Amino acid sequence: MGLSIAEVARDHRDYITETLQFYEQHLHPSSNEDEELVRRAVFSVRNKAIIFERFIPFSETLYSVVQDVRPAEVMIDFRRQQLTCSCPQKASCRHQLGVILALSQYFISVQDWAGQWRAKKNVQLDTLATMRSPESWQRMVDEVLLHVLDHSRHIDPILIPSLFENARMKLRRHRPFEREWQPLFDLFIEVTMLKRLWEHLIHTNSPMQSDYFLYYLDKVFGLIDSAVSDIQAARRLFATESFFDAIQHQIRAIVLLERGAPHRRLALYLSLWENLFTEKKEIQKELHLLESLPSGTSDIDLMALRSTFYILQSDDVQLQQSVQLIDPANLETFIAIAHFALKKERQQGAELILKAALPYLKEYIHQRLTPMRRQQFTKLLDLLYSQIHLHEREEFTLFSAYGKYGVQAFSTYLLTQQRYQDWVALHQLYPSSIPYLDSCGLKDVVANDPAATLPLYHYYAMGEIQQKSRLNYKQAVRIWRAMKSASKKAGKLDFFESYMQEIQQQYKRLRALQEEIDKSNLIV
């Protein structure tokens, strides 16, 4: 080997240091498994069980062997920053840590590093897990997250899913054996970890719009929903009541945080109040706490939050006063609560909110929502408004607020009202494509009022001709075939033949188009 190991270590000191920091974050001294892994890695360094076989300068790759019960081959690709081991363990193993420690000893003391890592140990996680109280479980979560959430350090969003998956694995090793306790344990640790992460992101002023963070939220919400379903299916023990009180407190704290993905926080809060907290005394207590908070406590409108509990108590008088405060700033929060009301079969409460929101929909959809969310939001609105009774003027206000983002919903409504001429006018106002027309009910219009569709077919056929390619001419012919079929149903076949003769005359210079028309037998 042309280079000494000391020189290799010093040349790649940054990567070695970063990898060592990664192990510090992922390994916890209070975990028996992690403590054993570090102990054996340090032992391999002390006993010179690590043999550096060769280093290839061209590819910056170091090959080494760790003499264990079975020898393990560890390779470090410094250029790609990859560390691999031949042992069957998929996650980080003692062999990889041993090699990193062996390299780091050229610029730090391995003994000091191990001593500092062990000094972070406060209490055994096993001890905390067996002490069945919210406080001990809370401390267990905090103990595991102690090395993940440094108060002064930003977390790279890309690391959030992996860091918290690792923390989840450590905590789940101490999951209770009793089936009745397991889903409660899962729910408790997920909610607690989520609250701690959110507080850390706010404290360090970290961005919360990263796809990685939103991916983590989606995964956590899925795990929480699964745990809640399991809790609903099992009998509720008296000994667990204090845990449910603690979870309720944590969820309230999450929804009242000052910023960050407010609609997702609200969705989590409403989900638990829909499925988990259903007793009258819990509802009254939560409403009393929310009413005692000053406005501006959170980026979620407190009056909207209180409306949730007015709905649960069927207090339409208080709800009527709340919905008078709806404006574009808090509209989506009230829409989420209307959705909640419909799930809880509180039809009247949902109707009060949805009708009060009607005048503000247009501004919210077209000025406040990002273009990517408009289509999805109008689909949600259509689902909600279809479950309440609207007068004709209210329906007009709703569909005009949708604009082009609600064409499909408006099309369905016009079909149910048998307003086929208006259906055609709508699609002339917002042109799209024949496949989209089919998805909006074109076949129903053809079946009931075929004559109304002829202008639409003409419009889309002309659009294909203007592209001036044989492929588009073929598509125009397909459209004319459908137009011929509609003309036949409408008793206007003579009109269609005259129309096609006029097309041939108008575009007689387009030879490819003429050939496609001749091949199609559109004109007998």
Image (tube, rainbow, N blue to C red):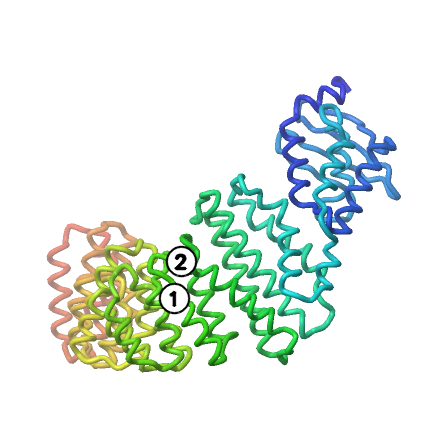
Q: Which mark is residue 110?
A: none
Q: Nearer the viewer, mark 1 or mark 2?
A: 1
Point 36% across, 77% down: residue: 311
- The residue nearer to you, when weighing 268 against 317, is 317
Report the side of 288 relative to 303 (left or right): right
- Label 2: which secondary element: helix
Q: Do the residues under discs 1 and 2 have CB atoms within 8 angstroms? A: no
Residue 54, how many percent across, how many down?
77, 26
Query: Which residue carries the number 2 mark?
Result: 262
Question: For the view shown, which residue lies furthest in the top direction?
Answer: 2
What residue is rendered at 77% in x and 46% in y?
Answer: 35
* Location of residue 512 in the rendering, given as x and y in whole percent from the top left corner: 24, 52
Labels in figure, total: 2
* 8 w.r.t. 93: above or below: above
Work out whether residue 125 or residue 501 is closer to the camera in this orientation and state it.
125
Percent x, y of residue 38: 77, 42
Q: Secondary structure at mark 1?
A: loop
At x 60%, y 52%, the residue is 164
Residue 519 visible? The answer is no
Quadrant placement of the C terminus: bottom left
**Residue underneath mark 1:** 292
Residue 31 visible in the current orientation:
yes
